[in-house]
Amino acid sequence: MEIAGLTVAQHADYLALVDAEIRPPHATTRPWDDFPLALGLDNLPWMLGAVDGEGRLAGGLSVLVRPFATGCGEIAVGVVGSVVTRPDCRGRGLSSRLQASAVALLQRQEVPLAALWTDQPEIYAGRGFTPAGWEWHAGLETATLPPPPPPVVIRDWEPADAPATAALYADHPWRTLRRPGDAGRLYGMPGTRGLVAVAAGQVRAAVFCGKGADFPDYVTEWSGEPGLVLALLGRACERGWASTVLVPSCGTALLAQLEAAGSAPVALPSACWAVTRPDLLRPKLAAAGRVAPASDSDARAWLGGVNVDGTVEPGPLGIAVWGFDSA
């Protein structure tokens, strides 16, 4: 089967295949609702498809490429997702070929890192993707979370809050550098609910629960003053929106407050990663005064990871992926 970029005509077929084959059974949204950036028609140059001998789409995937603010400056990352194969075409190595083609495309386009999420990392290890990096999953139900101090008011997030919320998100030192318009599309995803803390008419903190049908029962993104974020987390838990908050590797201030409040965070790999262009990463680390690892291909040697005892072992390159930026 030939693997090539999707055409406009094939885009609808690919979305239908993703919707039919890899949506969670409980999903009340569609994949383009939960992944508006990765699956939108404007991301078509980063979608690949395989066509069978009859000209029918046999499988495909999408890659969302964005620059990330990291501990070593700005670095482009390709987030691979929505990898799908038509049922009658499975068992032929098509998924492996699609991912290899995606990695080759990233290499040609000088994107040095790739990431994906999977429940079966052992499969993707053979394709160059290794669990690496870290994030904390902190339970809310065991924590004593304070109410907001007066005169702060908590209310539901509204579309008009998108600019202020995006400005709060931009204060995170490690984050995806979203394009203009990304924030509104992400915060307004069907199935995603948000809360904001407001004082004197200004949004000072925000939390968002879920990502459509993905990340059920999770606060996937938060921004603002940690004390106010705690109050928002408490309100989200009271409403039954979420019982766990995702804390990326740059969220140590909030993590400390969660632990003090009685939560017991657990560290997990942030994703499965592949180093696609180590030659582009080495100058970044050198400019930041970091020593690059000897291995070109071991993502954990670059990004660090979680040890078998659950402790975090940092790598020379610090990077954070938020739930909204998965694909």
Image: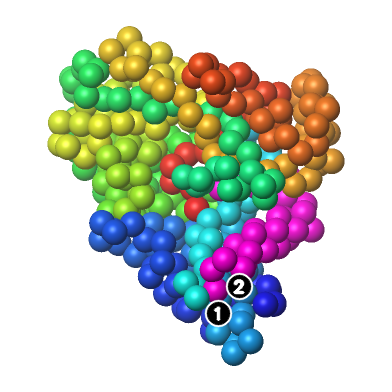
Q: Quadrant of residue 206?
A: top left
Start-end of magenta stretch: 89-116
Q: Residue furthest left?
A: 239
Secondary structure beneath dot 1 equals strand
x and y, in percent, of residue 179 in the image? 55, 52
Circle 2 sits on which residue? 49
In the displayed structure, 20 sits above or below 186; it is below
Residue at 26% x, 29% y: name it. Answer: 233
Circle 1 sits on which residue? 57
Is 202 or 143 nearer to us in this picture? 143
Dot 1 amino acid type:
Leu
* Crowd class of label 1 (few under 14; some 14 to 19; many from 20; radius 10 Å): many
The disc, 1 or 2, on the residue closer to the chain's N-terminal end is 2
Q: Is residue 62 visible?
A: yes
Residue 263 located left or right of residue 10: left
* Crowd class of label 2 (few under 14; some 14 to 19; many from 20; radius 10 Å): many
x and y, in percent, of residue 297 in the image? 76, 39
Residue 296 located left or right of residue 45: right
Residue at 70% x, 58% y: name it. Answer: 100
Secondary structure beneath dot 2 equals strand
Residue 234 located left or right of residue 207: left
Label 1 and label 2: CA atoms lie apart by 7 Å
x and y, in percent, of residue 150 in the image? 18, 20
Dot 2 amino acid type:
Gly
Is 253 or 302 nearer to us in this picture? 302
Residue at 33% x, 9% y: name it. Answer: 260
Whether pointer 1 and pointer 2 mark residues with C-beta atoms closer than 8 Å, the reply is yes
Q: How many marks?
A: 2
Quarter of the image where the N terminus is located: bottom right
Q: Quadrant of residue 265?
A: top left
In the displayed structure, 149 sits above or below 292; it is above
